[in-house]
Image: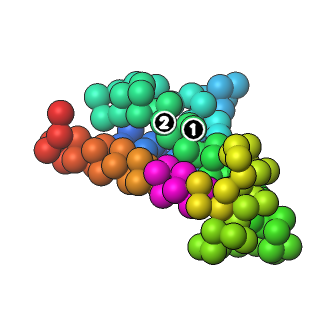
Amino acid sequence: TTPDEPVTLSPSDLFLAPELSEDRATGTLRRGYSNLLAQLPSTPFLDAQDAERLRHAHRFLRTLEALARIEADSSVSWILTDAERLEFTSGRLGLSPPSGQALLDRYRQVTDEVHAIYTKVVERLQGKGR
């Protein structure tokens, strides 16, 4: 599949496959996390507040990933766990004062929040949540 190739999904797939978004000009679905998150509507499965949290989490995690790639000078999908080595990165993310431990704490907070939203949506899709 190419990035511009249209994809067909069911409504429940929109949360589970966030790499897809609607091309407003053609009405087809296209790849692009940022586009989908920017257009994410409130639904019975995902409320507006959780959608906004996902947008903020995505922005933070993508920025962190980009900084990690720059620091490693290669493609990476992990972050260092040594707080001292993360101090510079925390400053680049705008944490004040720059602190590697604050960055690790923020990372854990964001990923825990995304996991909680995911769990809530899956439970709603399964008819267990409200």
Name of the residue lying farthest toward the front: 97
Looking at the image, residue 86 sits to the left or right of residue 106; the answer is right
Which amino acid type is marked by label 2?
Answer: Arg
Element at badge 2? helix
Would you call the spot at circle 1 few (<14 residues within 10 Å), some (14-19), or many (20 or more)? Answer: some
Q: How is the image coloured?
A: rainbow
Q: Tell me, yes or no, whether the two marked residues, 1 and 2, touch with CB atoms within 8 Å.
A: yes
Q: Is residue 79 above or below residue 58?
A: below
Q: Percent position (x, y) of residue 55?
A: 56, 37
Looking at the image, residue 23 sits to the left or right of residue 57; the answer is right
- The residues tagged by marks 1 and 2 sit, at their Cα atoms, a distance apart of 5 Å
Element at badge 1? helix
Location of mark 1 (residue): 56
Q: Which mark is residue 92?
A: none
Find the magenta span and give its range.
103-110
Looking at the image, residue 110 sits to the left or right of residue 35; the answer is left
Q: Residue 1: tell me if it is visible.
A: no
Q: Percent position (x, y) of residue 19?
A: 58, 50
Q: Which mark is residue 53?
A: 2
Q: Percent position (x, y) of residue 46?
A: 36, 33
Q: Is residue 109 magenta?
A: yes
Name of the residue lying farthest toward the left: 128
Find residue 101 and report its image quarter. Answer: bottom right
Q: Provide the major secondary structure of the magenta segment.
A: helix
Which amino acid type is marked by label 1?
Answer: His
62 vs 90, nearest the viewer: 90
